[in-house]
Image (tube, rainbow, N blue to C red):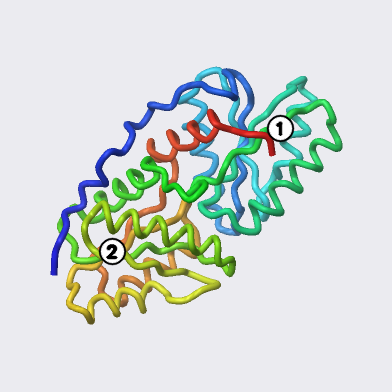
Amino acid sequence: MRSARLTGPAHAPTPGTARPGRAGAGVPVVLVAHGSRDPRAAAATRALARAVETARPGTPVLPSWLDHTEPGPTEVLRGLAADGHRTAVVVPLLLTAAYHRRVDVPAAVAAAREAAPGLTVRVTDVLGPADGTVDAGLLAGLGHRLAQAWPGPVDALVLAAAGTRDARARGSVGRVAAALAAGYGVPCTVAYASAAPPTADVTVARLRATGAHRVAVVAYFLAPGLFHDAVVAAAQRAGAVAVSAPLNDSPDLVDLVLRRVDTAGDG
């Protein structure tokens, strides 16, 4: 079986290449994370906000959460309006455009607009594939994290995601797996931590049964938490050589957030 050394997909953008665009310098950016009972997840979101703010001097970047952690995006947007801001950009820190992007984020923005009619809010695409396109910077970030965990060659990859019942969202995860397979020249199969089969241990075991002795798992997560912990335990149990860390506040993710900000539309 063919092996590939994990040096990262070709043609990825260099971190820090995002340039001010539609949002304009100084327009506040509100990051909206899913939220988790695990405090590590909120800490990672705060670290990402600080990193984005550092990369775009003069632009306030504020974290918010849809559940479990305060403040929520509506509260943050209302606060910006109260402070005199007339425009804000909302970035959903989501890897698929499932329920939270289609329902929760628009509802939070609508509530803020109702409370502050003079506030213009632009909402970006999610960080996963937008309009069917897998961002090269996202692939680079995943590749860099995996190379940190396992710099040696592999026979196959598993892209492990949180999971969703939304078929379209699962399709977008599949597009990322296909892009990784094409970039590295080895098979890449999707696994989920919840809501949909197969799990990481089942996927790793299947690949090993076909002769892939060095199976590495690419963690399709923005932040640490119980789902990532479950993927690590399951993959190691099945004999994976490595599981990558979440993207957290990596330079590739910071750059991707800024490029989303620069192309934000009305939403």
Tag count: 2
Residue 237 spot, x, y in % from top left: 31, 76
- Residue 215: image x %, image y %? 24, 68
At x 15%, y 58%, the residue is 153
| Horizontal side, residue 149 vs residue 117: left or right | left
Three-letter code for the amino acid on which mark 1 is drawn:
Val
Residue drawn 53% across and 28% down? Answer: 262
Q: Is residue 180 above or below residue 119?
A: below
Q: Quadrant of residue 190?
A: bottom left
Foreground pick, 244 / 13: 13
Q: Residue at x 26, y 75 (%)?
A: 207
Which residue lies under the disc numbered 1?
Answer: 121
Residue in view at x 59 percent, y 66 percent: 166
Q: Which residue is mark 2?
A: 157
Amino acid tagged 2: Leu
Q: Nearer the viewer, residue 221 or 224?
A: 221
